[in-house]
Image: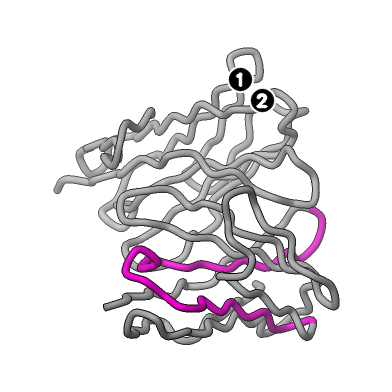
Amino acid sequence: GAVVSQHPSWVICKSGTSVKIECRSLDFQATTMFWYRQFPKQSLMLMATSNEGSKATYEQGVEKDKFLINHASLTLSTLTVTSAHPEDSSFYICSAHVQEDEQYFGPGTRLTVT
Amino acid sequence: GESVGLHLPTLSVQEGDNSIINCAYSNSASDYFIWYKQESGKGPQFIIDIRSNMDKRQGQRVTVLLNKTVKHLSLQIAATQPGDSAVYFCAENWGGGNKLTFGTGTQLKVEL
């Protein structure tokens, strides 16, 4: 089956710094990837749609200047949390669209901002 | 199940019993539905899907039922095992562009 990886699996950073999270499709190409955020005991909330070679589309309420998304190739999308604050601490999950309606999810990245 | 605040609804079942997890979806225009299983600290794992032109679909030990009239989705797990313990989410695809909207989730606990 299709495999999606994320790096790092967890990261701790200081308030005010930026952190980059990578999402890779390992054995397939994905023109579209999605980024989700999940707070403890809550559901996944879609943040943005990442399209290869074009600008990301952000969901309402998500600050595009704070959450920078780059989909530079068909196998890699990155999410950069800029000027991170403790309230940005969350579980960030990406998914890759394969074909028709199929999506495969990455293992997630735990971000803790101190 | 419905969720209020930060508390996930919990379903506790005995090992070997059947489990039924419910989900109310939001948009009558949704045409594709998926059930995911999420273990602690991991990403969602696909379980089974169903399209809006069907009302039932069966997989290995799992069955999904769709009632479009009341916008209700259920996941039935037969002979529940300890390894089934996880949070289960339903998701719907309605907006086009393959975007998914997730339900609130249900914590399934399997008791030995």
Mark 2 element type: loop
Check if mark 2 and mark 1 are on a common chain: yes
Question: Which numbered disc covers residue B67?
Answer: 1
Q: Position of residue B92 (x, y in %)?
A: 63, 39
Does the stretch in magenta take in A37?
no
The mark found on residue B55 in the picture is 2
Q: Chain of mark 1?
A: B
Q: Using the image as rendered, state which of residue B34 and residue A74 is in the foreground.
A: A74
The alpha-carbon separation of the residues under discs 2 and 1 comes to 6 Å
Marks 2,1: beta carbons within 8 A: yes
Expressed as whole percent of the image width and height from the top left, the position of residue B86 reads 33, 53
Chain for disc number 2: B
Residue A96 lies in the magenta stretch: yes
Quadrant that contains the N terminus of chain B: top left
Q: Residue at the spot x=77%, y=85% of the render?
A: A72
From the top left corner, tell me how far across and down residue A80 is, in percent: 56, 79
What stretch of residues is rendered in magenta?
Answer: A74-100
